[in-house]
Image (cartoon, helix red, strand yellow):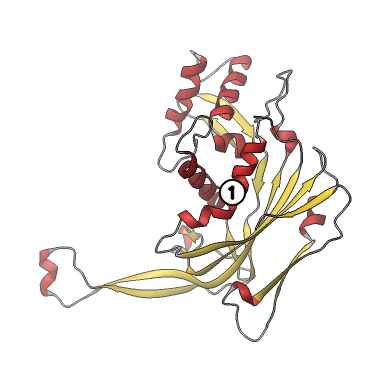
Amino acid sequence: MSEIKNRYEFVLLFDVENGNPNGDPDMGNMPRIDPQTGYGIVTDVCLKRKIRDYVDLVKQGADGYDIYVRSGSVLDNQNKKAYTAVKVKDTKNPKKEEALELIQFMCKNFFDVRTFGAVMVGKEANFGQVRGPVQLNFARSQDPIFQQEVTITRCAVTNEKETDTKNQTMGKKQIVPYGLYRAEGYISANLAKIDKGKKTVGTGFSEEDLALLWESLVNMFEHDHSAARGKMSARKLIVFKHDSELGCCQSHILFDKIKVERLSKDLPPRSFADYKVTVAKDVPKGVEVVEKL
């Protein structure tokens, strides 16, 4: 597989209806917000988790598509796959050449290391770290969101002793009635490039990996439904492709080409139809706009 040769930026628009896109454990699992403005937030690691889970579901651990940061996995066990294959004895203090081989093994075999990079330091091994070519910002809602806590009851009981009581178990659900979120991302061909002189480590992120990333961004919410995230949908995926490795302009210039406007100010937004999305055509020379969704 050949590594990518072009720089990319992209914008993902996704929405949530009566769900919690990313709960804050420090705030009783209420949907995350910017407390100064009331705008909703979804962290980059939350989105990366969904991408990892989608790739894991689709590829089922196929060669080259293992997942390093898997839910519930032990990272020391993941690292062991590398130093067993490379046959390194001193895993905590490997030689420079050995550390390079270990990182190359991890990039070749783990999709998320090849894509996002990783810090591969544990009690049993120290491979150092590698920067990934794909990075995401925090997603931010287009309007301030309303954090709502809904009381629910349970008609069943836990044990026989509770059958004689008439008290129902009470619970809470934390939701956003509706929110449209915008996430912006970057893909660096320079960080994907493998240095033939082996002086630096590129991850080898390939054109095939890129196609899988676009597929993941479009479909990752379709396989992540739950009681808390019942209706989340990717609405738009707009990609800016540069005709070179280093790119043709600053990323913020391209991000500013995408405008999301509310059609009515009378009532709070409650669906994607309440917004209008426009993409300006006057992009800088050498940049191609591709709407994946």
| Secondary element at image label 1 | helix
Q: Is residue 200 above or below residue 145?
A: above
Residue visible at 73% across and 40% down in the picture: 188
Q: How many marks?
A: 1
Horizontally, residue 186 falls left or right of residue 32, namely right
| Residue 31 at least partly seen | no
Compared to 116, does 282 lie above or below?
A: below
Residue 113, image x, y percentages: 57, 35
Tell me if residue 290 comes above or below residue 59 in the rendering. Answer: below
Q: How far from the left and from the top, in percent, is residue 152?
A: 33, 74
Q: Where on the picture, by quarter, is residue 191?
A: top right
Q: Which residue is mark 1?
A: 215
* Quarter that holds the C terminus: bottom right
Q: Please tell me which residue lies in front, 235 or 261.
A: 235
Which amino acid lies under the numbered mark 1 shown in the image of this protein? Answer: Glu
The quarter in which the N terminus is drawn is top right
Asked whether the viewer can see residue 154, the reply is yes
Residue occupying image coordinates x 80% and y 61%: 257
Looking at this view, name the residue that lies furthest to the bottom: 266
Residue under the point 50% across and 29% down = 63
Q: Nearer the viewer, residue 226 or 89?
A: 226
